[in-house]
Image (tube, rainbow, N blue to C red):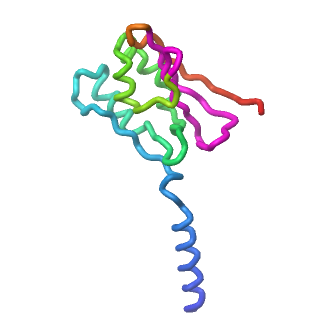
Amino acid sequence: MRRQAVRICIIVCMICFSCKSSDLYYIHHTKFGRFDYRIPCNPELVDKVNTNWLKHGRFDCHYYNEFAQDFPNKYKDCVVGRDKTLIKQLFGKPNIDADSKFEYIIADRCAIHMKTFSKLIFTYDANGKITDVTFVWVIRSH
């Protein structure tokens, strides 16, 4: 009986120590308070970001969920016409900042070489104002 308890303890310890916190997702909290009325659609938008915008601990990737996919349909009007710094303050540093776009990489399982993932893309103009928000799926062939 004692030998079995020791085995179980060893197995549990092996499982606990094999899990690294960097393999987990963590919530990215916005730079805004819940009742900061400089943010359009607040407090709903800040609440949604603070509870649904998850960043991977090791890979430069965010967790796929309905919030990310539905953002262009539900919250596009909240950010279009606003300064692009609002997006960085809400969502953190984008994965890609080029060609007048902020792109956030999203996947249900973040890894180094993902074959299927999606992007939440915020397009901005020469004045730094958000002009469009899209969600696209990306499928790599190789």
Residue for point 50% across, 52% down: 22
Frontmost residue, 35 versus 21? 21
Residue 78: x and y in percent read 36, 17
Residue drawn at x 40%, y 43% as measured from the top left: 27
* Residue 11 point in image, percent of width and height: 58, 75
Residue bounds of the magenta highlight = 98-125
The residue lying at 50 percent from left, 18 percent from top is 101
Give the position of the C terminus as an image quadrant. Answer: top right
User: What secondary structure predominates along the stretch shown in magenta?
Assistant: strand
Residue 109 painted magenta: yes
Q: Is residue 27 above or below residue 118?
A: below
Which quadrant, please, contains the N terminus?
bottom right
Residue 18 placement (x, y as % from top left): 56, 65
Q: Is residue 53 left or right of residue 23?
A: left
Q: Nearer the viewer, residue 76 or 14?
A: 14
Using the rendered view, name the quadrant where residue 105 is placed: top right
Q: Does residue 29 lie above or below 37 as drawn?
A: below
- Residue 119 is left or right of residue 34, and the answer is right
Can you tell which quarter of the image residue 117 is in? top right
Reply above or below: 70 against 133.
below
Spot occupied by residue 4 in the image (x, y as percentages of width and height): 59, 86
Most extreme residue toward the top, as rendered? Answer: 126
> How many numbered marks are there?
0
